[in-house]
Image (cartoon, rainbow, N blue to C red):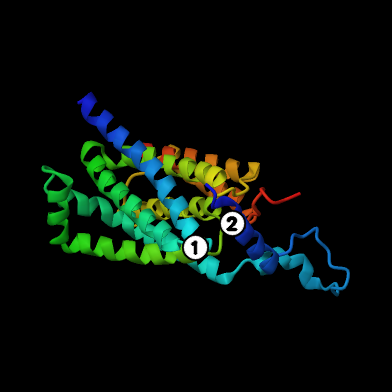
Amino acid sequence: MNLLPRVSDILNGILTARKRPKLDFDPNRPVDKADSMSVKRNFPIRLAAGLLLAILIDTALQLVWKTAVSSLPNDGSPWLNLQAALHSPLFLFVIFLMACQFFNWLMVLGKADLSYAQPVTSLSYVAVFCLSVLYLKEATDLIQIAGILFVVAGVWFISQTDHVTQSKEREG
Amino acid sequence: MMGHSAIGVLLVVICALLEGIGQVFLKKSVLGAVRWYLWISSGVVILFIETMIYSEALLFLDVGAAYAISSLNLISVTFMSQCLLREKVTRMRWIGVCLIFIGVSLVAARA
């Protein structure tokens, strides 16, 4: 817990270096048209790419995961399952995807709040849904479509918040 | 049969809690903490344990139910980012998280 003040110092440092709040006007800065675009311009392209990649890998993982699990013998301890898993190519593919996901995720976390990045990756549910309806010809119904709309609306709300927020501790 | 799926639900709820803790540890590691390697390795261990438990849970529940309950991950991660990382989770962000939670539950419940 005594790590928290230090963490907030670092966060403050990152924030002041990278991004000024919109209300914080610098009188010496020339006013230009691009100012109105400042929020969009400050959104790092690597963060956008990282989030997209996270969604894609997550989608692939969700689709492969169940197949991989059901290919295992469903008796015995987790350790026996682990041994069986290490001999299954499908499971090795899952582990490969997870490794990619992990390193990409660390990159994303370096650039955005956890409470921003995590909900945005829920778009993978939308992707899984669309893929199973379009390619696997799975039946769908209004409730599922409503669910998808809820997810999209939720991600829109998240995207309206700052991707990096300041720690409250040292303000004021 | 009831006992069977109750075990599954319990396992998935434990997974949601572990996910929250694990993700907070990973975030700590990239925040520039001095012992970042300790944060990252304990985060990985926690998430690994979570994965093992989740794959066990899938043997007790069908995948739709497991998905629906694992959307609790969102709530757990958001709550822990707010409490442990002091991220500013604004009302806008909570609305978004709740909408996604409802949406994922709706989709998954029919899967």
Which residue ends up furthest to the top in the rendered image? B2
**Counting other residues with Cα less than 10 Å from the Cα at mark 1, is it few (<14), some (14-19), or many (20 or more)?**
few
Q: Chain of mark 1?
A: B
Residue under the image location 74 percent in, 60 percent down: A21
Residue under the image location 36 percent in, 51 percent down: A133
Check disc 2 and report the residue beneath it: A6
- Residue A144: name its quadrant: top left
Question: What's the distance in space between the residues labelled 2 and 1, CA to CA?
Answer: 10 Å
Q: Is residue B111 visible?
A: no
Point out residue A68 in the picture as x, y percentages from the top left corner: 21, 54
- Residue A27: name its quadrant: bottom right
Whether the residues at callouts 2 and 1 have beta carbons within 8 Å, the answer is yes
Point out residue A146 in the picture as x, y percentages from the top left corner: 49, 41
Please indicate whether residue B100 sits to the left or right of residue B53 in the image: right
Report the amino acid beneath label 1: Val
Report the amino acid beneath label 2: Arg
Secondary structure beneath dot 2 equals: helix
**Counting other residues with Cα less than 10 Å from the Cα at mark 2, is it few (<14), some (14-19), or many (20 or more)?**
some
